[in-house]
Structures are given as structure tokens and as C-alpha cells.
Image (tube, helix red, strand yellow):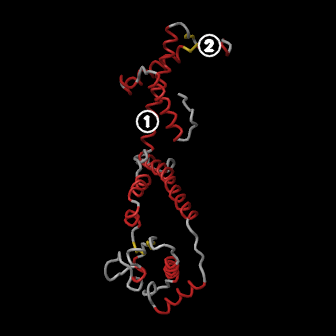
Amino acid sequence: MLKFAPQDGRDAAIQRLNEVDHRIVVGGEAVNDAVEIIEKMFSSATHIALIDTIKARAADRAIAKIAPFHRQRNGIDDAILIETYIDVIAAKSSTDDVYGFVTHNTHDFSDRSGDTRLPHPDLAALFDNSGSRYATNLGPLLGEFAEDLLDEVKFEREFGQEPRKLSELLEAEHRLFKQVWYNRHWNLRTAIERSKHRLVSREEWEQMPSKKRNDVTIDTVWEVALASAKRTEDELGPDEIGPWDDFEWGMINGKLSAIRWMLGDDWDMLDT
């Protein structure tokens, strides 16, 4: 892009590409979190062994062409699921227990000629809406038994803030960088006014031992710093250049450190 793209519109295109790259990185973390949740669910679930009798009954469904073999497709996997469910509810130890068969596959398990929230007529006898429930949406079914818990989980999983755009982070980093630099500039200006720091010519600076150079600044360099400070004042405005109390100064440095960390720097990167 930098080498071959026409100059007109190139910068805007590069900015958009950088935004996409940033969103991929940030959004990828959400995908990883979702995968981790699913893996935990599978690892903590009760594992049911697939036995030969279930396979045989699933094959019988195919021969009889009953759901989920009522369509022109191989539904052996779906048949194994429903036959496994039959064994599970047959083995339940208490009449108070409620089992649910929840699926989004309405083509193979639901009544396609009517209300798809109802099971296919070939499967209807398995569900009495009391101890055995059929559902095509997990949320409402859980809500009947643990509404408060469901609301809590939904809030935890669904609430989220839109991540900041890369351009917003860079803009904030620039402003905070200017504020930190300007504060340090004024500290040096105060030291010069109090004769704790001296301005010297370049010739004098070059003749000094390296240890003594920390307490002096070259006069021409200082002139550039003064001009830069004036530009910073004009850019930020009087309300954004301090002076800051200790709390405000800590917040500014903390924000700059956090944003730079997001952009790839170390936590304590506060160079100006």
C-alpha cells in the first residue's frame, strides 16, 4: 500500500486497514473466551456411552422411515441422539426430575407442518411437557426453572462495551503524551528559573564531562523546547495543560501507560 498506492486517499486507506487489524486482534479474544466456555461445558458434562442397542434402534428408525428419517437424508446421528434421550428419561430416578431435549434442528425433530416449537408427530409421545420437555430455544426453558440465574448469566455474557478504535487510542495517546511532556518541560523551566539547571552554548556543553551534562541544557535546544511548549499550549488549550495535583498527575501517567500497553509497549513506558 505504501509503495504502490496512489498518494490521493492512501493515508485514509491505511488508517482503515489499521483499524481492521486492531479489531481483529481485540475481537479474537472474545472468540477465544467463547471457545473456552464451550470446552468447559463439554469437560464438565456427563458423558453417555454409545451402546449397540442404541445403534440398533436408530437403524430401526431408518428402516421405518420415522423421524428423524422422514426426510431424504441420512439421519443416523440425529436418531442416535433421540434414542440416547429415550434411555436417559427411562432411567431417571425421581418423578420430580425434569429432562429437556433442546435443539435448533427443527427440520429433523420439529413438526414442520405446523408449529416448529413442537416435536415431530413421530417423537411427540416422548414429551409430556412435564417430566420431559421439547424446546428449540434453551433460554425460555431455563427461565422457567432458574430465571434469576439466567438473568445473571445473560448479563455477564452479553453485556459488553464496544472496544475503542485504533484511531481513538492513538489520539488519546498523543494528547496524554503532550500533557506529560509539557509538565516535565515546566519542571525544567522552573529549575532554570531557580538556577538549579543552566543553559549553556553547544561549545561549552561539548567541553563538559558527561556527568555534568545532566544539569545543563544547550541554549539552542531550549529555544526549540520553548517553541514546542507554545505549540502544545495552542493545541491542548488552557484547561488541558495543568497544573495537576498528585491524583490528576497519577491518572494522566496511568492512562498513558495503559494505552501504550494496549499498543504494544511495556506497562511502565512513559518516555516523552
User: What crowding class fits label 2: few (fewer than 14 Cα within 10 Å), some (14-19), or many (20 or more)?
Assistant: some
**What numbered label is drawn on residue 127?**
none
Q: Earlier in the sequence, mark 2 or mark 1?
A: 1
Above or below 28: residue 233: above
Query: Residue 246: x, y in percent?
Result: 47, 22
Q: Residue furthest bottom?
A: 63
Q: Residue at x 36, y 22 (%)?
A: 238
Above or below 141: residue 85: below
The number of numbered badges drawn on the structure is: 2
Q: Which residue is mark 2?
A: 205
* Of the two numbered discs 2 and 1 in the rendering, the one whose residue sits closer to the viewer: 1
Q: Which residue is mark 1?
A: 172
Query: Residue 270: x, y in percent?
Result: 54, 30
Above or below 182: residue 195: above
Q: Nearer the viewer, residue 152 or 18?
A: 152
- Hey, what amino acid is under mark 2? Trp
Q: Residue furthest top?
A: 195
- Hey, what amino acid is under mark 1? Ala
Query: Residue 47: x, y in percent?
Result: 58, 70
Q: Nearer the viewer, residue 216 or 43?
A: 43
User: What crowding class fits label 1: few (fewer than 14 Cα within 10 Å), some (14-19), or many (20 or more)?
Assistant: some
